[in-house]
Image (spheres, grey):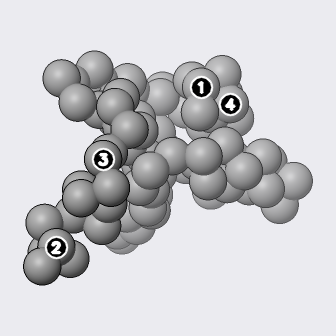
């Protein structure tokens, strides 16, 4: 997922962390169905993504991409390990 893939969205914010990269972008009310499809295809490549919608702040799309590939024991996170 690249910042360019989120270009239909306003002010994409990218933060680099040790183990992941996070991206947040405001989603305009006027985003067309075609642009929604493009944006969703881009975030579908992320490890995690979501949409935060509030009446006060509008809609914010977020995504997280891990920098390292998890080992077999880490897949699903600690809550799924036995």
Q: List x then y, in percent, for residue 27.
A: 55, 49
Are discs 4 and 2 less than 8 Å apart at CB? no
Which one is closest to the eye, mark 4 or mark 2?
2
Question: Mark 4: few, some, or many residues within 10 Å (few <14, many ≥20)?
Answer: some
What residue would you read off at disc 3? Answer: 71
Residue at 30%, 67% (x, y): give it.
Answer: 76
Are discs 3 and 4 less than 8 Å apart at CB? no
Which one is closest to the eye, mark 1 or mark 2?
2
Q: Which mark is residue 2?
A: 1
What residue would you read off at disc 4? Answer: 5
Structural distance between the alpha carbons of marks 3 and 2: 12 Å
Question: Regarding mark 2 in the picture, which secondary structure is present there?
Answer: loop
Residue at 24%, 58% (x, y): give it.
Answer: 73
Lateral position of residue 38 relative to residue 29, left or right: right
Question: In which quadrant of the rendered image does the N terminus lie?
Answer: top right
Tell which circle, 1 or 3, labels the residue nearer the N-terminal end.
Answer: 1
């Amino acid at each position: 997922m690249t910042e360019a893939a989120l270009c239909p969205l306003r002010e994409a914010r990218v933060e680099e962390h040790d183990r992941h990269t996070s991206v947040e972008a405001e989603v305009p009310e006027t985003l067309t169905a075609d642009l929604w499809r493009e944006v969703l295809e881009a975030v579908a490549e992320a490890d995690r993504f979501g949409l935060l919608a509030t009446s006060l702040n509008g809609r914010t799309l977020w995504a997280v991409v891990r920098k390292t590939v998890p080992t077999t024991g880490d897949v699903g996170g600690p809550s799924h390990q036995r």
